[in-house]
Image (spheres, grey):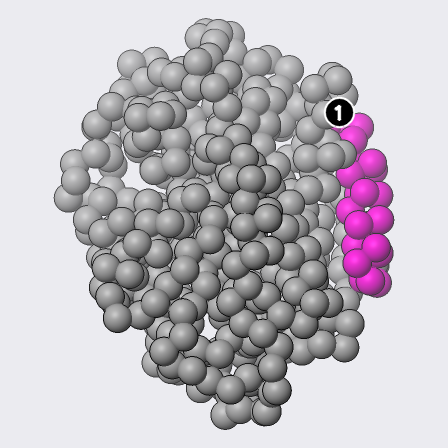
Amino acid sequence: MVRFRAARRSRLAALGAAGALVLALTACNGGGDTTTGSYGFPQVKQDDKSTITVWVDADRTKAADAFVKANPDVKVKVVTYDGSANGSNSFRTKMQLFDRAGSGWPDVVFSSQNNDAAWASQKSNGKQAFAAVLNDGLVKKETLDQFTAGALNPCTVEGKVYCLRNDLAQAVLWYNKKLLDQFGYQVPKTWEEYQALGVKVGQEHPGYIVGTVGDAWTPEVFFWASKCQANGITGPKSVTVDLDSDQCKRAATMLDTLIKNGTMPNVSVFTPEFVQKYSGKVLLMPGPAWYAGAIFNNPDSLNVPKGELGVAAPPAWGSDEAVTGNVGGGTWFVSSHSKNLEAAESFARFVTTADDYQVNVAPGYPAYAPAAEKWVKKQETSGYYATDLSAVVKAGTSIWDGWGSGIFSQEAVWAKTVTPAIADGKSLVSLLPEWEQAIKNQAQVNGYTVK
């Protein structure tokens, strides 16, 4: 994904609710007797002919379809769930139920979140961890080594790799080149220039926008890029939270300015309201790489015409080197309880590395470097973009490492604490202490020591 995960929210929610009973009934494996296998974790007796059960969100069904087509001899049962979108935590909740029952775990799970390895790598109520260790022989070292540098960091806990990254969700600056040229504006290279342009747009072209704050990943786009220490995971159970810094205040002040003048609406990009009000009106849009297919080149969303969409590197703050946040990317887990680890590993490896999915079908920038290179070439030869995609590639290596992947969801905290307060007219600067306390509370609930 792209973290294409968020698209069609209402449909995913309906699938999640309607499929709850199905999920409970599609248990693929029992607990069984276990022995410590050759991959460094307890294994049930293996059966390489058994069906593997795979959980995906609605957008990853295409990944499952591609695997089945390429591997017709492997028996696969596909179950659709919400992918833990917006920090719903459904993945973890379901696995905890199966842990208590001692059976029912799926063989492979896709999650739209990057923080699941933090809990999936740990024992639950004395039971073995859900996630299989991948870098002790289950996945070949040469495969792991070809993921883009840093891509597997969210999957790695104390040197062990517990998941494979679907795609990189680095944030970039999307813009409408046709409109910028028409209005006589230049692409901003700094956030200060970006804010000034937003002010000018509000004055000269009311109704046009330069971004949104209506989605739960807003802090990952703007505050992460400002090196705001809202999520400084410094250990398995340690986090540093400091929203009183200049880095946090400058991002909040910029957003307040643009919210106030109407160029930064508090509307989710995945709502009918957004499409109705802002189709043809998006001048700039800081956001993840997967926005390309999720909202711009999507007939069900903004449907920006061919040759208009440009992409630039994320802006810098002043003379600082530009950094970016990461908005999802999606992760694939193999269950340590699987009785067909061979097929489960084959599936997870295929959907993250194979051209049949990552290059030919996936809408987002692949985390697997060889696929990413081919994906960029394919996108550029399509003639859709008004610029080359070098900014997307560069941003993939510019993700600031001061934002970690803890158990708790920053998106859930933001959506509950900040989004409704913005709707009530409160400024982000005034909300920083409240947001900070909410993060600390959530971290402590999950057993973190907060500094």
Residue at the spot x=36%, y=78% of the render?
49
Q: Which residues are magenta?
A: 427-449
Residue toward you, 197 or 72? 72
* The furthest residue to the front: 25
Residue that numbered label 1 is attached to: 421
Look at the image and say whether residue 446 sits in the magenta stretch.
Answer: yes
* Above/below status of 33 relative to 221: below
Q: Main secondary structure of the magenta part?
A: helix
Q: Quadrant of the C terminus?
A: bottom right
Quadrant in which residue 114 is drawn: bottom right
Query: Does residue 185 appear to the left or right of 73 in the view shown?
Result: right
Estimate the x, y position of residue 334 in percent, counting from the top left. Answer: 49, 70
* Above/below status of 284 relative to 364: above
Quadrant in which residue 303 is drawn: top left
Q: Amino acid at mark 1?
A: Ala
Estimate the x, y position of residue 31 in percent, counting from the top left. Answer: 62, 77
* Above/below status of 287 relative to 426: below
Residue at the spot x=84%, y=49% of the render?
441
Residue 112 in view of the camera: yes
Residue at the spot x=51%, y=75% of the render?
338
Estimate the x, y position of residue 324 in percent, counting from the top left. Answer: 51, 48
* Above/below status of 15 relative to 141: above
Residue toward you, 202 or 420? 420
Estimate the x, y position of residue 199 in percent, counting from the top left. Answer: 54, 16
Q: What SS does tag 1 mark? A: helix
Look at the image and say whether residue 347 sits in the magenta stretch.
Answer: no
Query: Does residue 379 appear to the left or right of 48 in the view shown?
Result: left
